[in-house]
Amino acid sequence: LARGAFDEFVSSELRFEVSGMTKRTSPEGPFCAELTGGLGYDPVSGAGKKHKDDMHNLYLAHLCWRGNVHDQSENLIFALGRCDKFGQFISVGWSRPGNRLTLARRYLHPDDIRTTWDFERLRKELIAEVKVGGKVRIPPWKCPLMHSKLRKRKAPLQTSDEHTNKKLKLSTKEEQQDAS
């Protein structure tokens, strides 16, 4: 990509003035920045009222941009969070030179399967949608993962007894079909 190719997608009047602590999730894992401090953010341009998140965990592979052109997924960033006023959200974006972070946030319906995802699942789903080879082919916030369409949860998991009974019923049907 040419330098500045996605500039039109990263400019916004909405500002996040948040702060928090950063720590490693594991010795080899990503960093997690818990961003619940600071002035807050503008949910609507010109509204004049700042909001704060109850939980906002931002995950980064590195604390500073490295410019890895061979595996651009190193520059992807992910966040999981919750705001009492607006609900649960996921955020995806990237880091750029000068440690600039650009993210897009998607608030989720309580029945959306994405509300159950952890960082690893969000990361896996995003990389599958935006990465081809070592390159990020589209801005992360433009992928289907970030669409507003509700992704319904599946039916609750069955208990082991229900699962065993279902298996027995299937075996009986299969045996009957084999006998005929």
Image (tube, helix red, strand yellow):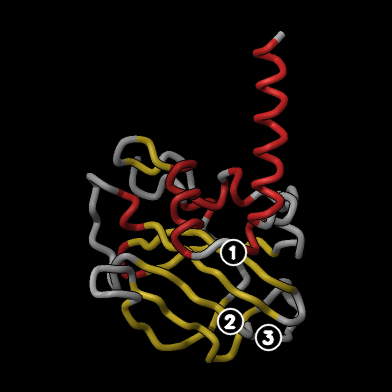
**Of the residues tagged 2 and 3, which is closer to the observer?**
2
Q: Does 158 appear above or below 115?
A: above
Quarter of the picture holding the C terminus: top right
CA–CA distance between discs 2 and 3? 16 Å
Front-lying residue, 5 or 161: 161
Give how far across and how far down residue 107 sits, in percent: 69, 64
Q: In percent of the image, x 51 and y 58: which residue is there?
A: 10
Crowd class of label 1 (few under 14; some 14 to 19; many from 20; radius 10 Å):
many
Q: Is residue 135 left or right of residue 119?
A: left
Gap in angstroms between the C-alphas marked 3 and 1: 19 Å
Q: Badge 2: few (under 14), some or many (20 or more) residues near its Cα, within 10 Å?
A: some
Mark before the other along the chain sequence, 2 or 3: 3
Mark 2 or mark 1: name the one nearer the start of the chain. 2
Which residue has dot 2 on it?
Answer: 55
The residue under label 1 is: 90
Displayed quadrant of residue 53: bottom right
Mark number displayed over residue 50: 3
Label 1 residue SS? strand
110 displayed left or right of 2: right
Q: Amino acid at mark 1?
A: Ile
Q: x, y percentage for residue 57?
A: 50, 76
Identified at 72% across, 25% down, the residue is 173
Q: Nearer the viewer, mark 3 or mark 1?
A: 1
Q: Earlier in the sequence, mark 3 or mark 1?
A: 3
- Residue 109, horizontal then vertical, whole percent: 76, 62
* The N terminus sits in image quarter: top left
Q: Is residue 134 left or right of residue 82?
A: left
